Image (cartoon, rainbow, N blue to C red):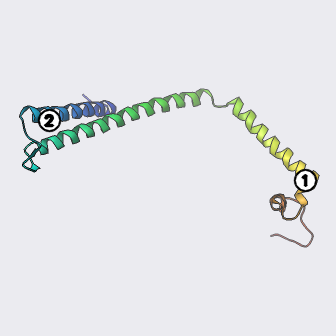
Amino acid sequence: MKIKAKTGDLALGIFSILGGIIILILTKVQGLQLIKGGQMGPGFFPTICGIAIAICGAMVLLEAARRIARAKTAQAEKEELETNILNLTELKNLLLFYAAGDWGTAALRLSGAADLPGTECDRLFENMGPRKSGSSRS
């Protein structure tokens, strides 16, 4: 019988939390003192171990729950991508953005703002215009 990783992590987390709680309960039932005479008593080590085991179990359980939630989200995204390969809204936005950029460039060139020295437009368009007769590129 094979156990999946998700199931194993869930079981380990639950049993670790229960084991830590049982250790704490048994320490109290046996009457072991946490501190005795200003020093660590016989109940100190089992109490610390029970708390640590319960905390580790809770962390394993939370990580397993996060992994399951991520897997469900990833599966839903995968299904959405498979069904919506071409999203018309995104395509429309891309075309509008491209057209706005093209029209903005044309408006700057027509208004002469691109030819003003020291402007950002000057730096943007210095390589886009016609080549000067004195410059040659290889």
Estimate how packed mark 2 is, as few (under 14), some (14 to 19) or many (20 or more) residues with alpha carbons within 10 Å.
Answer: some
> x, y percentage for residue 22?
15, 31
Residue bearing the label numbered 1: 109
Query: Quadrant where the C terminus lies?
Result: bottom right
Count of numbered circles on the image: 2
Residue bearing the label numbered 2: 23
**Which residue is pictured at 74% across the width and 38% down the height?**
94
Mark 2 residue type: Ile
Most foreground residue, 134 or 25:
25
Estimate how packed mark 1 is, as few (under 14), some (14 to 19) or many (20 or more) residues with alpha carbons within 10 Å.
Answer: some
Query: Quadrant where the N terminus lies?
Result: top left
Most foreground residue, 22 or 122:
22
Q: Is residue 63 left or right of residue 55?
A: right
Q: Is residue 85 left or right of residue 56?
A: right
> x, y percentage for residue 63?
36, 37
> x, y percentage for residue 43?
10, 42
The answer for how far apart the CA atoms under marks 2 and 1 are is: 79 Å
> x, y percentage for residue 38?
10, 50
- Mark 2 vs 1, N-terminal side: 2
